Amino acid sequence: MRKLQFFTFCFSLFLPLFGISATLTGPEKAEPGRLTVFQSDIQGDWLIYPPEGADLAKDSNERTLYFVAHHEGKFTIIFFGVEDSKPVISQTAIQIGTAPDPEPAPAPSPSPVVKLTDREKAAARAALEAVIDGVENGSIKTPSGARSTFKQTIMAKGQVCDGRSCHLSQNLQTLTEAWTERTDFSTAETVKTSFETFLKEVE
């Protein structure tokens, strides 16, 4: 399956180079051993990936492919042709048998149980609220902006100094590392949603 995904990804990189695509028709699903037929609206040639465990025959009209797979799996049908003196490349896919169930997304790891001092709680709440408020009022528009605001705030309010240097306390360091792993950094809004969850945990 990983080989098929990698092949399809690499193949898709070249699709924008071709200005024309063929219209391919055929079933999306079939049972092992069942004959299926694919057709193109222009003449050309056909390939199957993966080639193992499948038989194909091409009609003399160069528009029709007869395909039989002998085991379950997903096969990619690839068509090559020429139209108006320009190269044409198209693809479609067929699932033979039952598709495997998608792997469930791993559940986010809970934050470690850390006993914060009142000062550490205040620093954590201030950093979380600074991001939440910034997203709501529009001053924070990107995940990187949220990261920067959070870091600046928690460093300003949660540092401890030992005479040689200043750094976050071990409790806050542990907690912020856990929050980083659990945060959805897709957009500023998803960061805000994650931080609202963390704010409830601190309270």
Image (cartoon, rainbow, N blue to C red):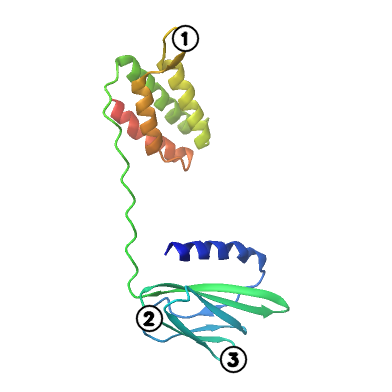
Q: Position of residue 148 (x, y in %)?
A: 51, 28
Q: Contact (CB < 8 A) between labels 2 and 1?
A: no
Q: How far is the residue under mark 1 from the one under mark 3?
A: 82 Å
Amino acid residing under circle 2: His
Q: How far apart in space, not on screen, are marks 2 and 3 (Cα)?
A: 26 Å
Q: In front here: 101 or 187? A: 101
Residue identified by numbered label 2 = 70
Q: Residue at x 59, y 61 (%)?
A: 13
Q: Residue furthest bottom?
A: 60
Where does residue 90 sit, x and y in percent of width and height?
57, 73
Question: In the picture, residue 179 is in which quadrant?
Answer: top left
**Judging from the image, what secondary structure is the residue with disc 3 in?**
loop
Lateral position of residue 161 relative to residue 202, left or right: right
Q: Are marks 2 and 3 in contact (CB under 8 Å)?
A: no
Estimate the spatial distance between the alpha carbons at disc 2 and disc 1, rounded to whole Å: 70 Å
* Quadrant for the C terminus in the image: top left
Helix, strand or loop at mark 2: loop
Residue at image point 38% right, 24% down: 173
Among numbered discs 2 and 3, the one appearing first in the sequence: 3
Q: Check the image and report above or below for 75 versus 177.
A: below
For label 3, the crowd category at 10 Å Cα-Cα, with few meaning under 14, some 14 to 19 and many 20 or more, is few
Q: Position of residue 6 (x, y in %)?
A: 50, 61
**Kind of residue indicated by mark 1:** Arg
Q: Residue at x 67, y 79 (%)?
A: 82
Q: What residue did someone put label 3 on?
A: 61
Mark 3: amino acid: Asn
Q: Which mark is residue 164?
A: 1
